[in-house]
């Protein structure tokens, strides 16, 4: 059976070049990057080379990159490492749980946290941010791109507000890295998280940009790895892969491949909406990353759509993979003001660098017919149709 994967925001496949780059570091190049002999020098050089590539993608110095085990660790390091008990933190209600739950934990350790609301298209209002500032505000943590809707926050404006207020600014750019250009100086952030597996490197590796001069408390205590910001022997194959993926992503952005992805995404979105009524885009009207479209199909359950499409070979998802299996509707869509039934009727389609025009045709041939069939079976839809 043909299978098409449109769930790249959950995880993205390794690009063959990335696998090729990391492969020797599983076998013949096995050294500990802290060893002073030949084997260590070889892996140290590879780690530092990868650091340069990641820095190239983000527009920073290599020394400002801290390698981590992924987006969750990067977010936790930023949130926990930049504040102390008694500090006030401002975040948004649509963050990934890696930030939201880290902030909940801060509240248990004597910090105060404000969770900003978002408007109907999923955007934080900079006015709300200004009004939330307090004399003891130490950190603003607001994501660059949302994992469920792809909506891009006005991070440069947030960076200016943070600078005027003398407050630190962290942004979770896990779903933005490699999809839109990132320049940490333009954003004006002090910390920025990325994750390998959202940009065609493997799961279990990520990085945190920490601006030079920003003091950060480590999460782990041990050796002096990563300039004492993250103890633990480096995951050399993962880091090499992240470096290669960052280099390839930068080259793709420089070539304008993101425009091609926008064209594919828009064709998918418009093609579905032209054939399906009582459906729409969550986050419509806001700037979005090229990869993502989140659609609601009233009167049917998103989980049922995901299962029906999977049986036909199309992989999509209902919001964050980390919360799949949970019955609760997405906190992101609810925060945007969607009724719970519409939030439950929403499905995310997310493209990757491997997605082709043929894949989009496959989805276009499948989705409208599947929605029509599920609605025929849905008593809610039939009642609504009768009352029209
Ligand atoms: N932040 C965002 C926006 C994400 O989408 C994810 C993963 O879904 C994470 C953080 C966590 O990243 P990781 O899976 O590498 O821990």
Image (cartoon, helix red, strand yellow):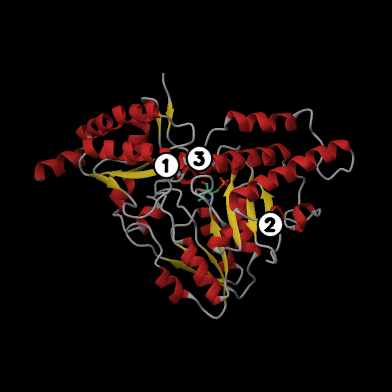
Residue 173 is at least partly visible in this image: yes
Q: Quadrant of residue 199?
A: top right
- Crowding around mark 1 (Cα neighbors within 10 Å: few <14, some 14 to 19, many 20+) is few
Residue 106: percent from the left, percent from the top?
58, 66
Mark 2 residue CB less than 8 A from any atom of ligand 1: no
Going from N to C along the chain, the mark reached first, 3 or 2, is 2
Mark pair 3, 1: CA separation:
9 Å
Q: Quadrant of residue 24?
A: top right
Local SS, label 2: helix
Relative to 143, residue 290 above or below = above
Label placed on residue 255: 3
Q: Residue at x 49, y 48 (%)?
A: 180
Residue 113 is at least partly visible in this image: no
Which label sits in the foreground, 3 or 1? 3
Mark pair 3, 2: CA separation:
26 Å
Going from N to C along the chain, the mark reached first, 1 or 2, is 2
Residue that label 1 marks: 259
Mark pair 1, 2: CA separation:
30 Å
Residue that label 2 marks: 64
Residue 346 vs residue 215, the one in the foreground: 215
């Amino acid at each position: 059976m043909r299978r098409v994967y449109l769930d790249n925001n959950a995880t993205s496949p390794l690009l063959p070049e990335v696998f090729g780059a990391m492969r020797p570091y599983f076998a013949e190049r096995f050294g500990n990057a802290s060893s002073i002999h030949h084997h260590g020098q070889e892996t140290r050089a590879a780690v530092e080379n990868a650091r340069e590539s990641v820095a190239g993608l983000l527009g920073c110095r290599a020394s400002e990159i801290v390698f981590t085990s992924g987006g969750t660790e990067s977010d936790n390091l930023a949130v926990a490492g930049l504040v102390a008990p008694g500090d006030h933190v401002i975040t948004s209600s649509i963050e990934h749980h890696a930030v939201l739950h880290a902030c909940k934990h801060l509240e248990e350790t004597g910090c105060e946290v404000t969770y900003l609301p978002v408007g109907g298209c999923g955007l934080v209002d900079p006015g709300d941010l200004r009004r939330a500032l307090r004399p003891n505000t130490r950190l603003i943590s607001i994501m660059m791109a949302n994992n469920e809707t792809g909506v891009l926050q006005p991070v440069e404006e947030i960076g200016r507000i943070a600078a005027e207020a003398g407050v630190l600014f962290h942004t979770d750019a896990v779903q933005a890295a490699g999809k839109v250009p990132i320049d940490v100086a333009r954003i004006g952030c002090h910390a920025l998280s990325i994750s390998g597996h959202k940009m065609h490197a493997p799961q279990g590796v990520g990085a945190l940009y920490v601006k030079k001069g920003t003091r950060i408390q480590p999460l782990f205590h041990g050796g002096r790895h990563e300039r004492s910001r993250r103890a633990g022997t480096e995951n050399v194959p993962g880091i090499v892969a992240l470096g290669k993926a960052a280099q390839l992503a930068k080259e793709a952005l420089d070539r304008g491949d993101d425009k091609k992805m926008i064209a594919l995404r828009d064709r998918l979105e418009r093609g579905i909406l032209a054939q399906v009524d009582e459906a729409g885009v969550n986050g419509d009207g806001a700037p979005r990353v090229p990869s993502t479209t989140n659609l609601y199909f009233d009167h049917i359950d998103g989980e049922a759509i995901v299962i029906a499409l999977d049986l036909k070979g199309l992989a999509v998802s209902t919001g964050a993979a980390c919360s799949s299996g949970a019955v609760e509707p997405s906190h992101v869509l609810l925060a945007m003001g969607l009724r719970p039934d519409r939030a439950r009727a929403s499905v995310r389609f997310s493209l990757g660098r491997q997605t082709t025009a043929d894949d989009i045709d496959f989805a276009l041939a499948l989705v409208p017919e599947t929605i029509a069939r599920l609605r025929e079976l849905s008593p809610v839809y039939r009642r609504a149709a009768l009352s029209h």
